[in-house]
Structure formats: C-alpha cells, structure tokens
Image (spheres, grey):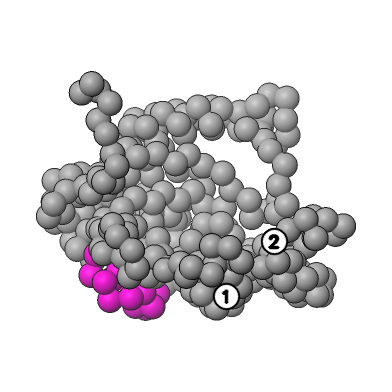
Amino acid sequence: APMPNSGKSVTVRGPLASTMSDLELSYRVLAQPDPSTYPSSLFSPPRKFSAQRNKVLGVHKQWIDRSDPIVQDSFYQALKYFEHELGYKVIDISIPLLTPGQLAHAMTIMAEGAAAHRSSIYALTPANRILMSVGRQTPATDFLLAQRLRNLIMQHLADLFRSHPGLVIVTPTTPNAGWPIDEAELSHGVTNGNMQIRNMEYVWLANFTGVPCIQFPVNYVQGVKGEGLVPIGLSGHGEWGSEDALIEFGFDGEKWLHEAREGGRAMPEAWVDVLKF
C-alpha cells in the first residue's frame, strides 16, 4: 500500500516471511494495485507464473570475489546445486561501473533523505543527523550525474535480460556474515560510513535500478559475538515485472535449504511449533 517516505526513488517495500508459501501469499496481497492512488493504479494485479521458464543464472565472478571467503563458499555450494540438481544454466556476465554505481546509489539516498528532512533533522538520532547533514551538501549537478549513471546501468541490465531470456542475476545478499554490535552502539548508535557501504555491496543494484529481487538463506554460521547462528543469504535479481518467476526461483532455493544443505534449515532456539499444542 502507498505510504509516506523520505526517499521516493529508493524506498522499496516488500514482504518478509519465514517460508516461500508465506512469501508468495504476502506478495499477492501487497501487490494488489490501489485504484485510488497513482502510480499504483497503473499496475495490473499479480498473476501466478504458469508458463515454462528458462532457468538461467548470471554470475559476475569478479563482483562475487569481493565477499568474505565463507560467503563465497556458501554461495557457490548453492549455485552448484542449482546447476546440477535443478537444471539451471549458469553463465558469466559482467556489470559495468559497480563501484561508481554504488556510490551514486548512496548519494541518492542521502540527498533525497536530506531534502525530506529540511526542518526536522533534530528529530533524528545523532548518527542520522550526521548523514543528513552530509547529504545536504550534495550539489545538484552531482545528483543529476548519479541519475544519468543510474540510467546507464539500467540500460545494461535491460540488454542482459534481452540477450538471456529468463535470466536471474545471482549474488550474495551481503558480503559478510553479519555486522557485530558493540555494547556502546545499543545506547548511542553508530556512524560507520565505510561499513554501511560495505554491507550494501550487492543490495544496492535492485534498490537503484528497480529490478525485482528475492533473498533467501543458503547457509548458517556462528556469529562473531553472542550466541546463535547468522544466516548467509543469496539474492536473485530478475527482469522488471518478473516477480512471479522469482517466486518460483525462491521455491527452488527452499529445496536447497531443506534437501541439500547439511543440517537443513536452522530454526531459532525460541521457535515453537504452535500446531502441536
């Protein structure tokens, strides 16, 4: 449903779910167009994917190499299962200007956020005040150049999808297995621009270009601090309008988690099966 936001071109909302069945149901409810709101009224209701789809996964290896070794190992183990057990074709692709594109994405978020908080910056936390203050210094020329770069990357993605029908571009969700939280950060917040950019190594692409994207866990590792396991995710980026095909891809990802990964899906320690009561 339409909601107010402070970053109109980079604010994306989607369902969060613990199973693919729940995700599909949530998506079909959330994606219903609102006839009273523009541009929601321009979209058609989602329909279940029924045609046979091409199973093609695109991998930019040099980009994957930027992630931590444990993330790479988890990513390629799942990719091997998709290729050899589920019949996917894995191809090499390249996406240009990744580093400038990510910086343009971050600058766009900050500039749009700063424009929306012209008089209310002091209602934010100290860490976000710093971000918005930096965003306010963005020259209009730089903002426009960032959008030109955005358009260029979208044109390249469009060519990839045109050349490889059914293509799903796969990456890790994040380049690391979580970001440990220090005690002081719980009460005072944190400002670490380098780490924030690092965490968005892969997620910026969908957020900046508008392609639909799905994430699901492919492995679990012990956290650096505290107890419990931290999930390592895989992201699948599809062509604009291919949400239903990505849902099918997500169900295949669930097969890996339940049928191929050693130990299967890790459940939270506090999880309770209420249906057994």
Q: In which quarter of the image is the N terminus?
A: top right
Which residue does the image show at 54% across and 67% down from the upper left?
A: 185
Residue at image mark 2: 125
Say whether disc 1 or disc 2 marks the residue closer to the N-terminus: 2
Helix, strand or loop at label 1? It is loop
With respect to residue 209, does 252 lie above or below?
Answer: above
Residue 94 lies left or right of residue 117; in this view the side is left
Which residue does the image show at 45% across and 31% down from the upper left?
A: 26
Q: In which quarter of the image is the C terminus?
A: top left
Helix, strand or loop at label 2? It is loop
Identify residue type, mark 2: Thr
Badge 2, how many Cα within 10 Å: few under 14, some, many 20+? few
Residue at image mark 1: 192
Residue 265 lies left or right of residue 101; in this view the side is left
Q: Residue furthest right?
A: 119
Which of the two residues, 148 or 77, is positioned nearer the viewer here?
77
Q: Distance between the residues labelled 1 and 2?
A: 14 Å
* 49 inside magenta stretch: no
Point out the frontmost of discs 1 and 2: 2
Which residue does the image show at 73% across and 52% down from the upper left?
A: 6
Which region is colored magenta? 59-75
Q: Is residue 120 visible?
A: yes
Quarter location, residue 84: bottom left
* 63 inside magenta stretch: yes
Q: Position of residue 108 (x, y in %)?
A: 69, 65
